[in-house]
Image (cartoon, helix red, strand yellow):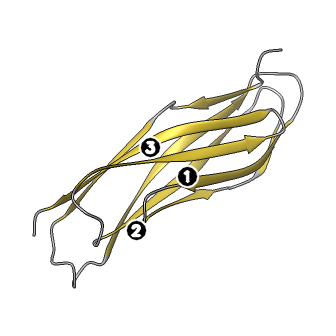
Amino acid sequence: MASALEVSPSTLSVSFTFDKPKAENPTFSKTTTLTLRNTKNATVNIISITDTSPEGITVQATPSSGVIEPYASISVSLEVEVSSSVSEGQHNGEVTVTSDDGTYTIPISISVLHSA
């Protein structure tokens, strides 16, 4: 049986440039959006949206649970916060959407540059 839930985009990428001294700016945050679309004639219950990220990086989903009506979509705001203590370079994590339709894993790539 085909999945009812479509998640887009299928991968996420966020870049951070720390352009102030660490003491002045201990964290940076950016927001990106994930779209969850129900393609079937039945509700889909989103049980949780969680992240697995390296230390110093957090991803907070809003909303982090809910119900998607048949043939409807919801937008999920993902706030990515990076501590200035995170080393420069590419860091990888995952955002996991758990629903009564299955579990979906979306890779997230976070690029960090220290210019100050």
Amino acid at dot 1 = Ser
Which amino acid type is marked by label 3? Ile
Are circles 2 and 3 on residues that touch, CB within 8 Å? no
Helix, strand, or loop for circle 2? Answer: loop
Report x, y in % for residue 87.
25, 63
Give the left or right position of residue 94, taking residue 21 as reference: right
* C-alpha gap between disc 1 and disc 3: 14 Å
Nearer-the-camera pick, 5 or 105 = 105
Distance (Cα) linking label 2 and label 3? 15 Å
The structure residue drawn at horizontal position 68% and vertical position 55%, both measured from the top left corner, is 64
Judge by depth and name the residue closer to the eye, 79 or 52: 52
Task: Report x, y in % for residue 34.
Answer: 55, 41
Given the current orientation, which residue lies at the most extreme left position?
116
Q: Residue lying at the far top in this picture: please name it.
A: 1
User: For the residue carrying disc 3, how many other residues have a C-alpha within 10 Å: few (<14), some (14-19), or many (20+)?
Assistant: many
Q: Which residue is disc 1 drawn over? A: 77
- Which amino acid, by three-letter code, is at mark 2? Gly
